[in-house]
Image: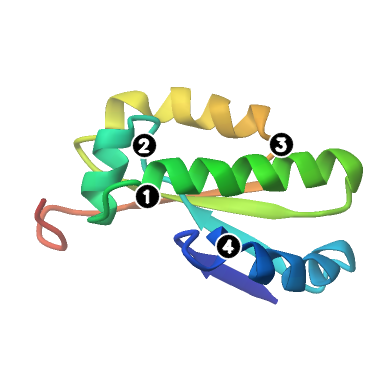
Amino acid sequence: MGILTNRVILADDSFFEKVQPYLLSRTVTLCISLDSLSPKLHDEIRGKTGAHEATLKVLKKLYSLKRIYPSIEYMVITILLNQNLEEILSLLNFLKELQVDKIQIQPILDNNLYI
């Protein structure tokens, strides 16, 4: 089973503690949204100031947990827009450093979203 989140529920430490046994048993895989390495751009895309900082906090928490329990799996979904296209390789390298298991890139066409 997968849980797709923009990190809001995971920012709550009590939720993270509740989901941790399911991560360890590989019953659940988390999918976190990260659209840019730039806090300003990520927050703009997500429509919430501080979203980037909170997302990185969760990703780093998952990375730390994965270093202790290598069987934990988590993935990241990135919305691909003209605004973040040039940094996509840097973002992918960053996610590789965090040992993200899977990365999904979702291109958005001009007729689907306007920022």
Disc 1 from disc 3: Cα separation: 21 Å
Whether 39 is drawn above or below 107: the answer is: above
Whether 101 is drawn above or below 3: the answer is: above
The local secondary structure at tag 2 comes to: loop
Residue named by callout 3:
99
Residue at x 33% of width, y 30% of height: 38
The local secondary structure at tag 3 comes to: loop
Residue named by callout 1:
51
Q: Nearer the viewer, residue 25 or 50?
A: 50
Disc 3 from disc 4: Cα separation: 18 Å
Near mark 3 (Cα within 10 A), the count class, few <14, some 14-19 or many ≥20, is some
Residue named by callout 4:
10
Near mark 1 (Cα within 10 A), the count class, few <14, some 14-19 or many ≥20, is many
The local secondary structure at tag 1 comes to: helix
Q: Amino acid at mark 3?
A: Gln
Disc 2 from disc 1: Cα separation: 11 Å
Q: Specify whether residue 20 is in view.
A: yes
Q: Amino acid at mark 1?
A: Ala
Near mark 2 (Cα within 10 A), the count class, few <14, some 14-19 or many ≥20, is many
Residue at x 81% of width, y 72% of height: 22
- Tell me which label, 2 or 1, sits earlier in the chain: 2
Tell me where residue 6 sits by quadrant: bottom left
Q: Is 42 displayed left or right of 16 in the figure?
A: left
The local secondary structure at tag 4 comes to: helix
Residue at x 54% of width, y 50% of height: 76
Closer to us: mark 2 or mark 4?
Answer: 4
- Tell me which label, 4 or 1, sits earlier in the chain: 4
Tell me where residue 47 sits by quadrant: bottom left
Disc 2 from disc 4: Cα separation: 19 Å
